Image (tube, coloured by chain):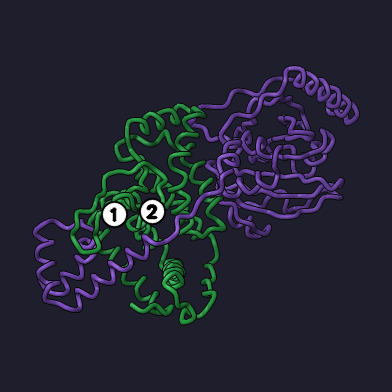
Chain colours: A green, B purple
Amino acid sequence: MERRLTMCPSPPRRNGASAASNDDGGGRSAARVREDDSLAGVVAGCQRGEGAAQRQLFDRCHQNVYRLAVRMVGENDAEDLTQQVFLRVFTSIGQFSGRSRFATWLYRVTVNECLQHLRRRPRMEHQVLACDPADRATPYERRAEQRDLLENALRRLEPELRSIFLLREIEGLSYEEIAQSVDIPSGTVGSRLNRARRQLKAQLIQLGWEP
Amino acid sequence: MDCHEVRELMSAFHDGEAPADVRAAVSDHLGRCVACAEELDGFERLTAMSLALPDPQPPSDLWDRLEPWLRPAVRRSPAGRRRFVASLVAVAAVVLLTAGLGTWAYRTWLAPRSAHHVAMNFDRYLGALEGDPENAQRILLAAYGGRRVDADEAARRVHYRPAVANGLPDGYRLDAMYVLDMPCCTCVQAVCRGPGGGEVVIFEHSEDQPVWFGDRPRITANFCGNPTCIVQVDQRVAASWNSGGRRITVVGARDLKEVEQLAAHLGGGV
């Protein structure tokens, strides 16, 4: 399925290691923040405090930030979280040295803000499905049911694992990029994704999903 | 490879992050092991379900709400500045003459210190406050991890009893208290209702530090023997002074008389 594009497409990363690792072309990998010389110039402008550069950076990146925030903290808080992320970005962009990719640094700020927000907030009540899954008969309804199930299961996943899963499956980051974004050894990304996927599957089954 | 080893490598294999020789060994195992093949199938289905999630779209006015926090304060007209300064001078003279507080001085606020000194930047908050007070408060809380507390919890968080917790002048009511994780320190914010029904916000910082109101016209007056920086915010006044080694900033006072009253009550002297 082709994901709606927020940035210009970049070459797909996957190399077909398994049946599901298909080249999704204009799909997930196209949702990444495009890193090129123009972005470097925009970042430099932001570091000089230029308002136009700040607007450009916001325009290029805010959908990625918002999408991750929605999945991490919910739609109600995602707007405030997104604003908070960009406030942090623009006040601390002078600390971005350019040694890593800017997207990695941006995701790091986003994940940190989301995790801090979740630590401060009382645990959310789990959303109750609108209707009995058995009532949904058409393929469209079954797909909608699966989306609801996955969103519910994601909310039940512990935040640190949720962030890693989302950075991989939604934002399309490599293991090295994920490691930099959440500040963990790159060698542990695979094992954490194993945990995330197995826990998600268990939650889905508990919610009525039939594997 | 056995099942335990393959399970450890399952995500790396599924995500194309495993080296070629490892992929070959895992593939060989998957061809012979139903359980591991089913697990990989489960990972693949999760990926497919993730790709099918809708892409949430941010509100179109997100930048408009963020931008006031990023730009310098809107410059007022030179004529407006002169009128404001003249009116403040007149009012300040009357207040000080009446109260017998002695001399006052007019000078511009010192330029902000270097980046190594953390200053409470009220410029952005005041800029947003003039246009949309509710949104300004929301952004303030979002930007600094604001959390609503009572006086006792505020005291526990900041390790001192906030001045507001000792009571407000007659006619004032405390509506809400928050703690904010500012870059400088954990700050206490008290949102109050004044005698006329207007909102007055009181910030208290644990350290005596400079505050930055942007390039708004300002004066410095002496209240209770304490230099107090005063600026205009729309039709109201913001003021900031040191109090016992801490910094108190009031936003939303009607006039200097109210600033004087609050300074005397909250602690305007060392």
Label 1 environment density (alpha carbons within 10 Å; few <14, some 14–19, many ≥20):
some
Question: Where is residue A196 shown, x and y percent of the image?
Answer: 33, 66
Camera-side residue of A209 and A193: A209
- Quadrant housing the N terminus of chain A: bottom left
* Residue at figure coordinates x 51%, y 48% from the top left: A82
Q: Chain of mark 2?
A: A
The label shown at residue B123 is: none
Q: How many numbered badges does the structure rendering display? A: 2
Q: What residue is rendered at 39% in x and 75% in y?
A: A203
Q: Is residue A41 left or right of residue B140?
A: left
Q: Mark 2 — residue?
A: A3
Residue appearing at x 46%, y 82% in the figure? A134
Q: Upstream in the sequence, badge 2 or badge 1? A: 2
Name the residue located 83 percent from the left edge and 23 percent from the top edge: B87
Residue A191 image point, x, y percent: 25, 64
Q: Which residue occupies the foreground of this view, A21 or B12? A: A21
Residue type at the position of mark 2: Arg
At which x and y percent is residue B160?
A: 63, 51
Q: Label 1: which residue?
A: A24
Mark 1: which amino acid?
Answer: Asp
Same-subunit check for callouts 2 and 1: yes
Q: From this view, report whether residue B255 is shown above or below residue A2.
A: above
Res. A6 in view: yes
Figure check: A21 above or below B212: below
> Are discs 2 and 1 less than 8 Å apart at CB?
yes
